[in-house]
Amino acid sequence: MVSVAESISSFLPAIMNTAPRKPVLRSPAFWRSIMGSSAPWCLESMTRVTSRLEDADLFVIFARFLNPPAEEMAHVEAYLERGGPVVGLRTSSHAFKIPAGSPYAKYDFQSKVPGYELGFGHQILGNTWVGHYGKNHVQGTRTQIIREQKDHVILTGVGDNAFCYAGAYVGKPGPDFTVLTESQSLDSMEKDGAPDTTKPPMPSSWTRHYASKDGKKHRVFHSTQGASQDILDESYRRLIVNGVLWAAGLETSIKPDLDIAFVGPYQPTTFSFDGCVPNVKPSDLAGWESPIMPQGEGHERAPSKKK
């Protein structure tokens, strides 16, 4: 999905540059070619680089219904078994759709494997796919801070009532969640839209810990928003940046005035199916100043099917 590429690639390089990292993680070509391309290439590339999870500091996932080859899922499983921290955005609650006959079927979003029911979304992020809450692409959302959590480090510098274009998801908090924000469905796709009074606020971002193979607990940050246009809102963008830093154990880098400006021009397309920007190559996104996504001749979007 193009929204995955657009959302992450614009600010994740800046996040990774807040502390010394391996040269590959500081490379604009790496992040922008892997995370900033049009959907088919992006998904293929994300699969190819799962081997990098072997010594990764953090696993950021924004995916939907993937069924990677077994040799690639092996890297994902090894990362989770060693207890690496995880950040999941939006559709990552149903990141994997893996047939029952696969050795990695337990990660499927509808998993019935004993001890790993409902798969990666439920076992790691805390929720599998439950459903939309309101009408996606018809009702935007207002992200409201939970008053009791206003002093949580992830909410440092985050303003209340951030506007997200992505519709709300059903969120079912578990007893181990620290819910940071709720999504209030609106009556329109406008930032100043009125609240939908038939839809009380729904949990939309939280932290929790999952158990690795050795039984130890490890950090997770999850947001049910995060589509391409959502991060245009500075407060929502700061929430995600702070969540990434917290998950990676870099909470001392979180400051209320931390620079969260986009890395290069950010020109998001509307999140949708079958609406990818065509003819995007890694070289088009290789520099910090490369636009995300390219526009103009040759890059006209095909008609999309909004869902």
Image (cartoon, rainbow, N blue to C red):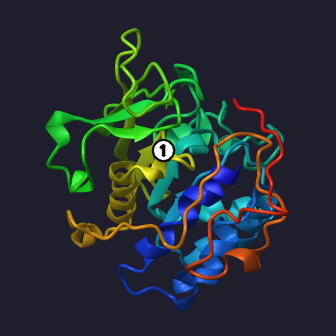
Estimate the x, y position of residue 152 in percent, counting from the top left. 19, 50
Amino acid type shown at disc 1: Leu
Q: Residue at x 50, y 29 (%)?
A: 189
Estimate the x, y position of residue 210 in percent, counting from the top left. 42, 49
Depth check: give the residue in front, 119 or 277.
277
Q: Residue at x 53, y 74 (%)?
A: 56
**Image vertical order of residue 2 relative to residue 53, above or below:** above
Depth check: give the residue in front, 170 or 97.
170
Q: Residue at x 59, y 31 (%)?
A: 129
Give the quarter of the figure containing the C terminus: top right
Is residue 216 in view? no
Determine whether, in the image, residue 59 is placed left or right of residue 162.
right
Image quadrant where residue 35 sits:
bottom right
Depth check: give the residue in front, 17 or 165.
165
Helix, strand or loop status at disc 1: helix
Determine whether, in the image, residue 128 is placed left or right of residue 40.
left
- Dot 1 corresponds to which residue? 125
Q: Residue furthest top?
A: 198
**Image vertical order of residue 24 relative to residue 107, above or below:** below
Determine whether, in the image, residue 87 is placed left or right of residue 92.
left
Is residue 215 in view? yes
**Total number of numbered discs in the rendering:** 1
**Image vertical order of residue 247 relative to residue 307, above or below:** below
Q: Dot 1 surroundings within 10 Å: few (below 14), some, or many (20 or more)?
A: many
Q: Residue furthest front?
A: 297
Estimate the x, y position of residue 112 in percent, counting from the top left. 66, 30
Determine whether, in the image, residue 186 is placed left or right of residue 176.
right
Depth check: give the residue in front, 206 or 73.
206
**Image vertical order of residue 229 relative to residue 50, above or below:** above
Q: Residue at x 57, y 50 (%)?
A: 228
